[in-house]
Image (tube, grey):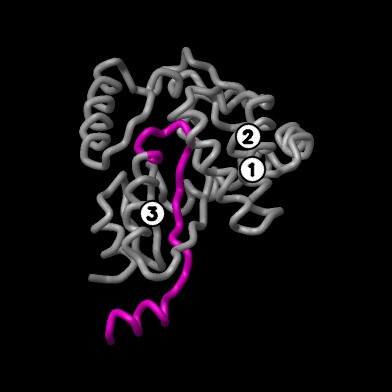
Amino acid sequence: MSDTERETETARPIGIYSDYVCPFCYLGRESLAQYQRERDERLEIDWYPFDLRADKRRPDGSIDHAVDDGKDEDYFEQAKQNVERLQAEYGVEMSLDLSREVDSLPAQVASFYVKETYPYERWLAFDEAILDALWQDERDIGDADVLADLAGDVDLDPGEIRDAVDDEQWRERVTERFDAARREGVTGVPTFTYGEYAARGAVPPEHLRRLVEGN
């Protein structure tokens, strides 16, 4: 089967399990963007929320930062070095100062609401605005006011996004997606999926090309 025939037969969005506060997810999206620029046809994203802070959440959904999740300062220093290496590899500027303090749950609820309610392009614009707000502009995407501002910037109704963030049913749906990701065997992010195949981590564009095109 030729590459063209395979693309036609298996054309589908690329799945991405990710959490907005994960620096490797931001870098993975940059890798995906670089791969997409090489393609003749657009490759849509099917985003699945994932909660990196699941083990630290209280029953009310808030984060207990005192919980020991096994990630000490040595872990974060090694992660920082890996992020800096990938920044240089992918040509990405980003700030790491705020991400460890931010709760991404409100942003994930807002994004999931838009994904389920609006056409793909509207969701993608909002999703990218959330990512840039945290990693480029050092804005707290756990703040409903920030999310409302971002919504207005991409022609969504700020009040509608505020309501979604406060809606327990939407929060429960996102929590169910977190649980589903674990059941599906996703233990870390980013995880890219295409059909029955998967790639974990902020892999280079050529790895994503192989994932999608089978080369």
Please report the residue visible at 77 percent of the width from the left and 39 percent of the height from the top: 160
Magenta stretch in the rendered image: 1-26
Q: Earlier in the sequence, mark 3 or mark 2?
A: 2
Q: Which residue position is annotated with label 3?
A: 192
Against 136, residue 211 (above or below) is below
Type of residue at label 1? Val
In-front residue for pair 122/144: 122
Residue most extreme to the top: 66
**Residue 136's x, y, as percent?**
44, 29
* Mark in front: 3 vs 2: 2
Nearest the eye: 39 or 147: 39
Reply yes or no: does residue 184 show up in magenta. no
Mark 2 and mark 1 residues within 8 Å of each other at the beta carbon: yes
Residue wearing tag 1: 154
How far apart marks 3 and 2 lie (CA) works out to 26 Å
- Labels 3 & 1 near each other (Cβ < 8 A): no
Few, some or many residues within 10 Å of mark 2 (<14, 14–19, 20+): many
Separation of residues labelled 2 and 1 (CA atoms): 7 Å
Q: Is residue 100 above or below residue 44?
A: above
Dot 3 amino acid type: Phe
Disc sitting over residue 150 in the figure: 2
The Cα–Cα distance between marks 3 and 1, rounded to whole angstroms, is 26 Å
Whole-percent x, y for residue 169 in the image: 75, 42
Image coords of residue 60 (percent x, y): 66, 24
Mark 2: amino acid: Leu
